[in-house]
């Protein structure tokens, strides 16, 4: 699913902002994010531990054959090579190893030079306090549809804000019944296993949603059920550097 979405991207890779996204996550995981003497765990070794050498032999033989603790620039370099890109396979493997969810991985891979400029300049972008969850609910939790309701704001900023609020992407390539399964769990008080089973959603996918969901997930689902008309969020849960709320 991630590979297909990545390969269908309409624009070429923006190496620097993607590398910066990867580097930030790698730092959180305690991985080495620079070339030179190895002092920390390597991304390439993390990828091997995630996928196994036997499977990697078919997609990236050099990675499968490398010794533990030895830098492989074609993989480790995605964290610090800002001027030259690695292969698409390398970016996909890195994203899959670094990030827990599909949405997080795609957000990192979809970064553009324009988005990096928006974030790094710390530009103040005003989103009325209730508008984001309201439009998200009206769009049935679809990130793309939600961003289209904010035509003057960079898609990356809107997606980042939704993710920071713990609001998952029910659109795109997520399971078609994920919204129903989440509603069964949060609103109907069904167990996690029952909610996933009834709607045919992989348990791991629903668990990931619950693990990353914001504290107001149930309220958002009620808004979706009511057509996105209910307003909530009496105070801001979390602010991103690039977003300011209007009074």
Image: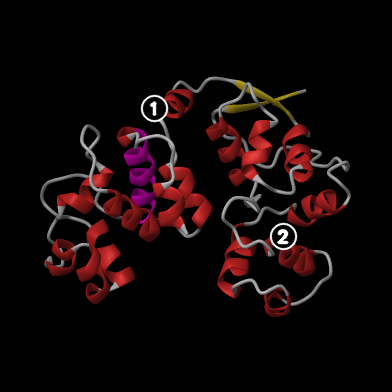
Q: Position of residue 157 (x, y in %)?
A: 56, 32
Q: Position of residue 53 (x, y in %)?
A: 22, 73
Q: Position of residue 226 (x, y in %)?
A: 89, 50
- Classify residue 203 as left or right of residue 181: left
| Mark 1 Cα-neighbour bin, 10 Å: few <14, some 14–19, many ≥20 | few
Report the coloring of the rendering: secondary structure
The secondary structure making up most of the magenta span is helix
Residue 40 painted magenta: no
Tag 1 residue? 113
The reply to whether residue 117 is in sight is yes
| Mark 2 Cα-neighbour bin, 10 Å: few <14, some 14–19, many ≥20 | many
Q: Position of residue 13 (x, y in %)?
A: 34, 37
Tag 2 residue? 179
The reply to whether residue 41 is in sight is no
Instruction: Write the residue at 49% across / 51% down.
Output: 104
Which range is magenta? 17-29
Q: Is residue 31 above or below residue 132?
A: below
Q: Is residue 170 above or below residue 110?
A: below
Instruction: Write the residue at 35% across / 54% down.
Output: 92
Residue 132 falls in image quadrant: top right
Residue 19 painted magenta: yes
């Amino acid at each position: 699913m991630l590979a297909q979405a990545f390969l269908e991207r309409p624009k070429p890779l923006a190496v620097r902002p993607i590398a910066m996204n990867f580097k930030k996550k790698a730092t959180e995981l305690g991985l080495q994010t620079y070339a030179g003497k190895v002092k920390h765990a390597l991304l390439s070794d993390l990828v091997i531990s995630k996928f196994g050498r036997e499977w990697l032999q078919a997609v990236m033989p050099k990675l499968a054959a490398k010794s533990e603790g030895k830098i492989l620039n074609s993989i480790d370099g995605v964290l610090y090579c800002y001027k030259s890109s690695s292969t698409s396979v390398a970016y996909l493997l890195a994203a899959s190893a670094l990030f827990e969810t599909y949405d997080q991985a795609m957000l990192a891979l979809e970064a553009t030079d324009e988005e990096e400029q928006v974030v790094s300049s710390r530009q103040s972008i005003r989103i009325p306090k209730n508008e984001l969850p309201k439009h998200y609910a009206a769009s049935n939790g679809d990130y793309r549809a939600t961003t289209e309701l904010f035509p003057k704001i960079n898609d990356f900023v809107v997606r980042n804000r939704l993710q920071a609020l713990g609001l998952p992407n029910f659109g795109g390539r997520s399971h078609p019944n994920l919204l129903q399964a989440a509603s069964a769990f949060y609103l109907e008080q069904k167990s996690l296993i029952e909610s996933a089973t009834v709607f045919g959603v992989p348990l791991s996918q629903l668990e990931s949603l619950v693990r990353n969901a914001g504290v107001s997930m149930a309220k958002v689902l009620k808004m979706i059920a009511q057509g996105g008309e209910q307003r909530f969020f009496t105070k801001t849960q979390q602010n991103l550097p690039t977003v300011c709320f209007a009074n």
